[in-house]
Image (tube, helix red, strand yellow):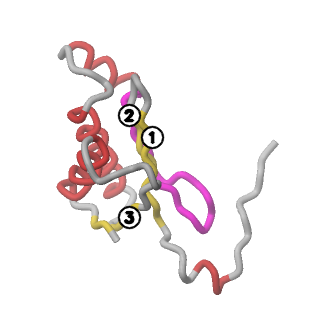
Amino acid sequence: MVIPPVVRPERVTNFLKPYVLKMHFTNKFVSAQVIHTPTATVASAASSQEKALRLSMEKAQESTRDVTAAAKIGKILGERLLLKDIPAVSVFLKREQKYHGKIKAVIDSLREAGVKLV
């Protein structure tokens, strides 16, 4: 069953930030995705669960859940966004999320990759 995207009036979509960064951290993995809000679709995503990245991190004896893994995910996501011609992303943190640790690593590596934060 395919759920169609939400149809919003134009006066609402003019005030929405088009691309929003969402981050999710578990006890084993780090993932981040950029969502296109007018169409409610995922524009790009990166995760430490991806097979190629996970295997390379296991060979190098690196963790898939710490700050360095979060920085790698941000760098990969930034490169993928630039390949899709998405130059800017907005970040909305949840109430319990602070600009510290893994969150800071993802956002800073996105900036270093060349993605602007709105």
Nearest to N terminus: mark 2 or mark 3: 2
**Residue farthest toward the front in the current orientation of the protein:** 96
Q: Is residue 38 magenta?
A: yes
x, y percent for residue 96: 43, 49
**If the image is split into quadrants, where does the N terminus sit?**
top right
**If the image is split into quadrants, where does the C terminus sit?**
bottom left
The residue tagged with tag 3: helix, strand or loop?
Answer: strand
Crowd band around label 1 with a 10 angstrom C-alpha radius: few (<14), some (14–19), many (20+):
few
> Answer yes or no: do the residues labelled 1 and 2 have beta carbons within 8 Å?
yes
Residue 10 higher or lower than 36, as above or below:
below
Q: Quadrant of residue 15?
A: bottom right
Residue 77 higher or lower than 31, as above or below:
below
Q: How far is mark 2 from mark 3, CA to CA? A: 19 Å
x, y percent for residue 99: 29, 53
Q: Which residue is mark 2?
A: 30
Residue drawn at (28%, 41%), measured in percent from left and top? 102
Q: Which mark is residue 24?
A: 1
The residue tagged with tag 1: helix, strand or loop?
Answer: strand
Q: Amino acid at mark 2?
A: Val
The residue tagged with tag 2: helix, strand or loop?
Answer: strand
Crowd band around label 3 with a 10 angstrom C-alpha radius: few (<14), some (14–19), many (20+):
many
Q: Which mark is residue 89?
A: 3
Closest to the observer: 83 or 14? 14
Which segment did they paint magenta?
34-50
Closest to the observer: 10 or 25? 25
Residue drawn at (42%, 46%), measured in percent from left and top? 23
> Answer yes or no: do the residues labelled 1 and 3 have beta carbons within 8 Å?
no
